[in-house]
Amino acid sequence: MVVDQLSPAEVDRLFHALADATRRDIVRRVLVHEQSIGELARRYPMSVTAVQKHVAVLVEAGLVTKNRRGREQRVSGRPETVRTAQRLLDELEQVWRERFDRMGSVLAGPTTQEEPT
Amino acid sequence: MVVDQLSPAEVDRLFHALADATRRDIVRRVLVHEQSIGELARRYPMSVTAVQKHVAVLVEAGLVTKNRRGREQRVSGRPETVRTAQRLLDELEQVWRERFDRMGSVLAGPTTQEEPT
DNA sequence: CTGATCTACAACCATTTGGTTGTATTTAAC
DNA sequence: GTTAAATACAACCAAATGGTTGTAGATCAG
């Protein structure tokens, strides 16, 4: 039930990587098919260097990988890591669901016990 | 199938809000039961002001709400927004799944037909 | 009313972020 | 062997982030 293997810092990196529209778009593209830095850069109104940095952030987060192919660097998506993020949110939602279930118990009868602070 | 109503900037805010361990912990707590700023602050090694700022970020992201109750401000979690984040990730994963399906089609042979949209 | 508590907010600070330009290295093409 | 293309990387910059302290306004208790 506990997702981890990921340190809080890694989770930070993961969600931080997703908190930028350009990076999300890059992930979307390279989940469809790998693409070079240059190909990606042509799609955004920014320098190749800027895209390089975005890709570096995504690599650190584990959302994409780089594979050198001759003089280009092919970027491809890692769906497992998207899944990891999903599981983290599922855990969060589960916390709420458990409360919801407890509330159901309250409605069902007086046997429910509050957790002490 | 399309999640939207959320602008890219709103999605940015949502994931950015989740990209901090303290904020994730606050969300977890207030999903269980609402809590005042002060109560929350006692749990973290930082000032009340710092926690206030974290809560403000979470409010902007729609992950929590504040409700004044006398002199305190009760913070409670919004599970719908957690759900929204999940759907955004589901969409990302779906992009990959569609590619996977296309690859499957190729492997299965040329007779396979995509489901019309 | 007085005093304590809870929250708000401004000002400040160091670090990180997201971008730039410029230079260097590697690889491909001719 | 030159030249062009793709990437890497350092240096720089403005703005945002995540924290602090200090001050002030509400609200509750006595």
Image (spheres, coloured by chain):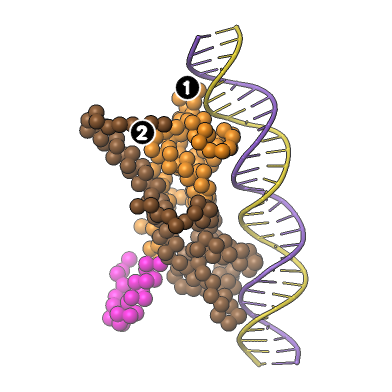
Chain colours: A brown, B orange, C yellow, D purple
| C-alpha gap between disc 2 and disc 1 | 24 Å
Tell whether position B9 is magenta: no
Q: Which residues are magenta?
A: B96-117
Q: In the rendered image, is residue A32 in sight?
A: yes
Instruction: Out of C22 and B76, give the one closest to the viewer.
Output: B76
The residue depicted at 29 percent of the width and 75 percent of the height is: B113
Residue occupying image coordinates x 50% and y 66%: A64
Please give the residue where the numbered disc 2 appears in the rendered image.
Answer: A115
Q: Are marks 2 and 1 in contact (CB under 8 Å)?
A: no
Residue farthest toward the left in the current orientation of the protein: A108
Residue B70: assigned label: 1
Q: Are marks 2 and 1 on the same chain?
A: no
Give the answer, above or below, for where A88 lies relative to D3: above
Image quarter hosting the C terminus of chain A? top left
Q: Residue A48 sits in which quadrant?
A: bottom right
- The percent position of residue A31, horizontal first and vertical second, equals 45, 68
Q: Position of residue A4 (x, y in %)?
A: 43, 55
